[in-house]
Amino acid sequence: MSSQHDVPADRRLPDELVESLVEIRHDLHAHPEVGYEEHRTSEVIQRELTAAGVRHVGGLAGGTGVLAWIPGRGEGPATGLRADIDALPIKEETGLPWASTHPGRMHACGHDGHTTILLGAARVLAEESKAGRLERPVVLVFQPAEEGGGGGRRMVEDGCLEGRVAPFKVDRMFGLHGWPMLDAGMVGVKDGPLLAASDRFEIDVHGEGCHAAQPHFGRDPVVATAAMVTALQSIVGRNVDPLDAAVVSVTVIDAGSAFNVIPMSARLGGTARSLRAGIQDLVERRIEEVATAIATAHGCRAEVRYQRGYPVTVNDPDTTDRVRAIAGEELGADRIVEVDRPTMGGEDFAFYGQVVPASFFLLGQRPSPADPMPDLHSPRYDFNDATIETGVRLFRRIALAS
């Protein structure tokens, strides 16, 4: 496992700082809170910012978001650094001493690590500012509800990038995500689309209930729903250009309450993912067309609800080049991995990239290729403490070089 002691002495963070950050991460991990309920987490963030002498405002994005800022020698604009702070509704199975104390809640996506890294960056950048080495101001965005709640959008709507909360406008944004498919000490970068637009759909299928022994007296919504699940797969297979990427996954089916009754209605739902706006439009339109036609063919009626979620996370090439250069100088050119294709997961960091040039990069988590770790959203996932120091160093250098 990599550690900060593999780093040249002149680039290491003080041991006591790293140790204190690990303690913070363990504390956050033990007290996970899901989207818009991160009240204790927000209090911890504000306590640590106060201790570091960093000015901040809480109560954002519905109540738990925090925005902090550190002045530079110039008046602005500022470099933005972001962390998400929420957990997931998952029962933890790690068995670690710092495992979740909140039943059915855990930090299974590493947001405890992201938050800790940004708090570490706040500490070191506050010292750089005092020493007069910080040219541009820095705005630190601690946002709630990344896991489906759109906290990033609400931070933007609250004016966090526009100078309405902090005294500085943000003209470029950077964020990171722990990535268990990359080795610790490695950084993944990619120009253009990195993560997909993430939408959801629900379809109510209305039929006519009857006795299951006499199906000809009813209009069976269960059969219609079964046909619908199969037919929806044709959207990707037959409507989307094979050189484009899309996903339509039915993940929820709900119908009936007795083995001998054909119910009045059935419900299905799922997710749709895409990497281009045109494909997103196509998928939305075809889901409604297919569902409506299949229901009609079975004598039923379909009611389709399609909800657009996060847009595509698109990395600005010039901003991403900054990450490449800085990570190469800080970690070594051999530690940079060019991500060859996007992932179909979604990220609300995308909302920042719709306002200013932005770059989202991947921070390796895996101890070694021979020592794999659980994937994100696994009940056995735990952020790799040995990578906290790397994340802080990268955020520090990004702020200093911007």
Image (tube, grey):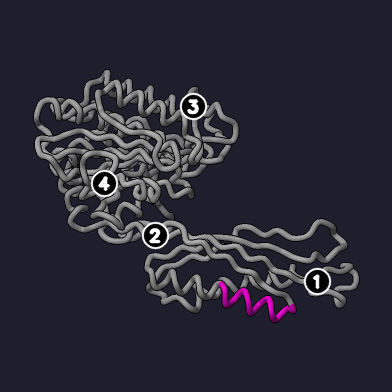
User: Is 297 covered by the magenta stretch?
Assistant: yes
Q: Nearer the viewer, residue 286 or 190?
A: 286
SS at mark 3 in the image = helix
At label 2, the amino acid type is Pro
Please tell me whether mark 2 or mark 3 is closer to you in this view.
Answer: 2
Of callouts 4 and 1, the N-terminal one: 4
Figure label count: 4
| Residue 371 visible here | no
Of callouts 1 and 3, the N-terminal one: 3
Please tell me whether mark 1 or mark 3 is closer to you in this view.
Answer: 1
Query: Which mark, residue 174?
Result: 4
Q: Quadrant of the C terminus?
A: top left
Query: Which mark, residue 311?
Result: 2
The residue positioned farthest toward the top in the image shown? 16
Of callouts 2 and 4, the N-terminal one: 4
386 left or right of 74 in image:
right
Residue pointed to by mark 1: 208
SS at mark 4 in the image = strand
Residue pointed to by mark 3: 30
The answer to which image quadrant residue 140 occupies is top left
Of callouts 4 and 3, the N-terminal one: 3
Q: Residue at x 74, y 67 (%)?
A: 222
Q: Are marks 2 and 3 in contact (CB under 8 Å)?
A: no
Query: Which mark, residue 16?
Result: none
Cα distance between the residues tagged 1 and 3: 50 Å
175 left or right of 245 in image:
left
User: Bounds of the magenta span?
Assistant: 288-299
- Where is residue 194? Give x, y as percent: 33, 57
- Where is residue 180? Give x, y as percent: 39, 43
